[in-house]
Image (spheres, rainbow, N blue to C red):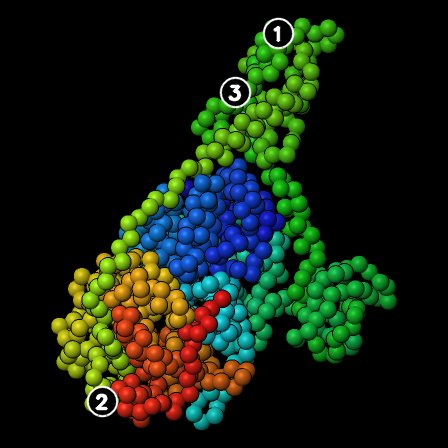
């Protein structure tokens, strides 16, 4: 039975060595461009080729992340880089951009592609859609329940990869615009500023508030649940952490390696040993403990680190009568946290003596003495643990691959060394064995020379003498023979993965199409907005049925409208949403959505328009959906120049949002439910969101409206709308469709915007922004 893959992160050469030496089956890493961890050290071309060769010698696969959105002007460079990776032997690339996927499928089909979690694949139909489009593996969203993973992996027989340890984004990956809108640093371009780790308040209209790091989730840890995860049928267990130190990588990989091996070796799970590994993982990094993400349910506030968003450490003691009563061991140079501050231990005083370390139960003074009576101390860095872990990868060839060799040692014939490795026979010859002048080279001497360890992962472990006569060759001959054999094995392994494929040319067609998207469309979220648009608008109407107010709208009231479907529909609720769509199909003109499952299921039954959360960033992204969508709303992160460039090349196929508050986040976690609603491991939410409205308030005292849907997901919208109505004629002339999104606008505000759209007023008195239209994103 083939073991499940343990996939480790590498943000540096040292981290890669740490992962391999501690038992990773595969590594994912980024190059200097197009990687979703732009701030990691990453690998230049020379180092990445070394990394691939090094890993392959150990039988470890390498996946390179090209998982950012690609601008049109960057596409050729990205493709050339992909070709370089393919030719130096990368096992697969992990990608987010649909345009890059389209080009790779057509220009370099030999290269294996994996769908990044940034593609937000979270239901079986969506996974099937990408699998049918040429994706070998799907990295699933971190919000899935274990049963949903099993459905995709087993019932649909799709190769999947899931995150099992490390940081958890609070928003569905690939759907977050918070960092981009607030600071111009796009998470979709690998430059997330992590606004989710900042403090927030949640306010209702009465002025009641809850505050803390309300959007900061604990890290995932599933080491106790690996049997259930393996049984789900997923192919790969992914550890997050390309920004982490090599000691962290070594520790996480070694703990998960032991736990996985014990399952396959059918050893009875030892809770004490698993707890010991978990304690070590806690010491390496945690945020107020761990969570299991959503694998076994949504536990509300219990999966969050409301008090502290960084490494919390492990509780090590409390100050009583001026001394720290230790709950665990401490040593010089350990890191200590007290509240938001901390220090590195420079001295330990025990019973008036200076010592190098102290143990659980001791009462000590720690210097510098930055604590006061009653303080609780946490150990954030364990110098002895870090030393132990760094020793595990001190030598890049610490872990050796044994070879069983055969030798022919006959006087008058060249000494011959051979072995079988990887279904291939290797054989090398040395000098002719001479009649000894003095003493012959004995078997023991030959074995000792051949078993020497060199600068290689291989070692000759066992030697079988097929024949032996008491002859003589210099020891240097035996050493050279060993080197030649191992060099031959290494070179062959490296060559097996190398390729010489070139990028194919493709015939681009930029024929103009009649606009199949409505020339202009107004999206409404509630009945009041719908009434205003019907009475005052000349445009098509799209009804957003994501939220409760419009979910139960009678089908005949949607006659001639489009419906907007949530971009997130998990398998647990998928049939409910599909049933609603089928109920509406006889009445509606089409669907607007970014949900790949809905696109896959309904593209042949009605007009589907791709929503802006598909993150279409280049003209080839439009081509990817050529046979599935009637048109696409472009990414809201594009600037004027980029939009116009795509419009020239794909006229009649695209549209833009010219007014509306962008959806900044969509989350399986609900900040209202976790605070005012009381949702936790032990309590269900009181559904207070159905009675009151709430906003998320940031450090700048800006309010962001929070909506919740029928399935208790939360949606956070920007505080102000983007307003590009002033540029509508330019968009229209270039063959683009237009859209206005009403989110929480009042009837008066809706009428004001429509009057401005129709030229009945010169300006609107609503605070707004141009979004990224002028500058774009980093």
Q: Is residue 3 above or below residue 371?
A: above
- Crowding near the residue tagged with mark 3, few <14, some 14–19, many ≥20 C-alpha atoms within 10 Å: some
- Residue 536 marker: 2
- Crowding near the residue tagged with mark 1, few <14, some 14–19, many ≥20 C-alpha atoms within 10 Å: some
Where is residue 332 drawn, in percent x and y? Answer: 76, 60
Q: Is residue 367 above or below residue 8?
A: below
Where is residue 664 drawn, in percent x and y? Answer: 42, 75
Name which quarter of the figure residue 477 lies in: top right
Q: Earlier in the sequence, mark 2 or mark 1?
A: 1
Q: Nearer the viewer, mark 2 or mark 3?
A: 2
Estimate the spatial distance between the alpha carbons at disc 1 and disc 3, rounded to whole Å: 19 Å
- Closest to the observer, 210 or 229: 210
- Residue 582 marker: none
- Closest to the observer, 618 or 275: 618
Where is residue 251 drawn, in percent x and y? Answer: 59, 53
Q: In the orientation shown, which residue stands out farthest toward the right? A: 352
- Residue 411 marker: 1
Residue annotated with mark 3:
427
- Closest to the observer, 774 or 477: 774
- Crowding near the residue tagged with mark 2, few <14, some 14–19, many ≥20 C-alpha atoms within 10 Å: some
Q: Is residue 172 visible?
A: yes
């Amino acid at each position: 039975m083939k073991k499940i893959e343990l996939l480790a992160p590498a943000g540096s050469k040292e981290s890669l060595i740490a992962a391999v030496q501690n038992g990773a089956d595969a590594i994912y890493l980024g190059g200097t461009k197009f990687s979703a961890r732009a701030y990691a050290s990453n690998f230049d071309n020379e180092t990445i080729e070394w990394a691939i060769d090094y890993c392959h010698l150990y039988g470890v696969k390498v996946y390179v992340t090209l998982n950012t959105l690609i601008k049109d002007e960057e596409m050729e460079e990205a493709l050339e880089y992909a070709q370089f990776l393919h030719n130096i032997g990368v096992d697969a690339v992990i990608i987010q951009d649909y345009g890059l996927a389209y080009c790779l499928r057509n220009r370099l089909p030999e290269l294996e592609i994996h769908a990044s979690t940034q593609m937000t694949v979270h239901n079986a139909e969506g996974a099937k859609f990408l699998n049918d489009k040429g994706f070998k593996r799907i990295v699933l969203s971190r919000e899935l329940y274990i049963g949903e993973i099993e459905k995709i992996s087993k019932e649909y027989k799709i190769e999947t990869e899931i995150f099992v340890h490390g940081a958890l984004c609070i928003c569905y990956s690939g759907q977050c615009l918070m960092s981009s809108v607030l600071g111009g640093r796009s998470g979709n371009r690998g430059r997330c500023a992590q606004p989710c780790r900042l403090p927030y308040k949640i306010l209702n209209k009465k002025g009641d508030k809850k505050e803390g790091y309300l959007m900061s989730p604990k890290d995932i840890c599933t080491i106790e649940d690996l049997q259930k995860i393996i049984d789900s049928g997923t192919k790969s267990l992914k550890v997050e952490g390309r920004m982490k130190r090599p000691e962290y990588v070594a520790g996480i990989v070694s703990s998960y390696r032991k736990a996985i091996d014990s399952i396959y070796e059918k050893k009875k799970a030892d809770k004490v040993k698993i707890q010991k590994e978990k304690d070590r993982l806690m010491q390496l990094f945690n945020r107020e403990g761990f969570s299991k993400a959503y694998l076994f349910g949504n536990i509300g506030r219990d999966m969050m680190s409301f008090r502290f968003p960084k490494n919390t450490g492990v509780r090590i003691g409390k100050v009583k009568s001026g001394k720290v009563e230790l709950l665990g061991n401490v040593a010089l140079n350990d890191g200590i946290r007290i509240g938001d501050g901390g220090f590195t231990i420079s001295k330990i005083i025990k019973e008036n003596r200076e010592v190098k370390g102290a143990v659980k139960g001791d009462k000590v003074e720690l210097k510098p003495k930055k604590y006061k009576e009653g303080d609780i101390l946490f150990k954030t860095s364990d110098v002895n643990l870090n030393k132990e872990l760094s020793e595990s990868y001190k030598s890049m060839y610490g872990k050796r691959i044994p070879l069983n060799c055969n030798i022919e040692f006959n006087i008058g014939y060249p000494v011959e060394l051979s072995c079988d490795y990887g279904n291939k026979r290797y054989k090398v010859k040395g000098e002719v064995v001479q009649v000894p002048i003095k003493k012959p080279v004995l078997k023991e001497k030959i074995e000792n020379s051949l078993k020497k360890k060199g600068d290689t992962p291989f070692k000759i472990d066992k030697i079988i003498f097929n024949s032996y006569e008491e002859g003589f060759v210099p020891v240097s001959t035996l050493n050279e023979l060993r080197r030649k054999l191992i060099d031959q094995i290494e070179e062959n392994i490296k060559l097996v993965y190398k390729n010489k494929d070139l990028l194919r040319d493709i015939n681009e067609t930029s024929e103009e199409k009649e606009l199949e998207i409505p020339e202009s469309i107004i999206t409404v979220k509630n009945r009041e907005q719908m009434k205003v648009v019907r009475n005052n608008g000349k445009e098509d109407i799209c009804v957003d049925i994501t939220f409760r107010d419009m979910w139960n709208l009678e089908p005949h009231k949607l006659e001639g409208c489009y419906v907007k479907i949530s971009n997130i529909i998990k398998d647990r609720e998928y049939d409910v949403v599909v049933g609603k769509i089928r109920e509406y199909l006889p009445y509606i003109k089409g669907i607007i959505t970014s949900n790949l499952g809905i696109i896959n299921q309904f593209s042949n039954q009605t007009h589907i328009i791709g929503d802006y959360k598909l993150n279409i960033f280049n003209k080839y992204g439009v081509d990817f959906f050529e046979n599935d969508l009637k048109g696409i709303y472009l990414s809201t992160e594009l600037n004027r120049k980029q939009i116009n460039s795509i419009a020239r090349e794909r006229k009649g196929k695209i549209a833009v949002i010219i007014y509306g508050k962008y959806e900044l986040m969509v989350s399986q976690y609900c900040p209202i439910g976790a605070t005012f609603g009381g949702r936790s491991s032990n309590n269900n939410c009181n559904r207070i969101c159905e009675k009151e409205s709430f906003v998320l308030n940031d450090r700048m005292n800006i309010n962001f409206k929070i909506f919740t849907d029928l399935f208790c997901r939360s949606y956070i919208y920007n505080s102000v709308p983007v307003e590009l109505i002033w540029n509508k004629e330019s968009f229209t002339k270039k063959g683009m469709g237009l859209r206005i999104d009403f989110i929480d606008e009042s009837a008066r505000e809706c009428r004001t915007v429509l009057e401005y759209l129709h030229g009945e007023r010169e300006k609107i008195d609503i605070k707004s922004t141009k979004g990224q239209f002028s500058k774009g994103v980093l």
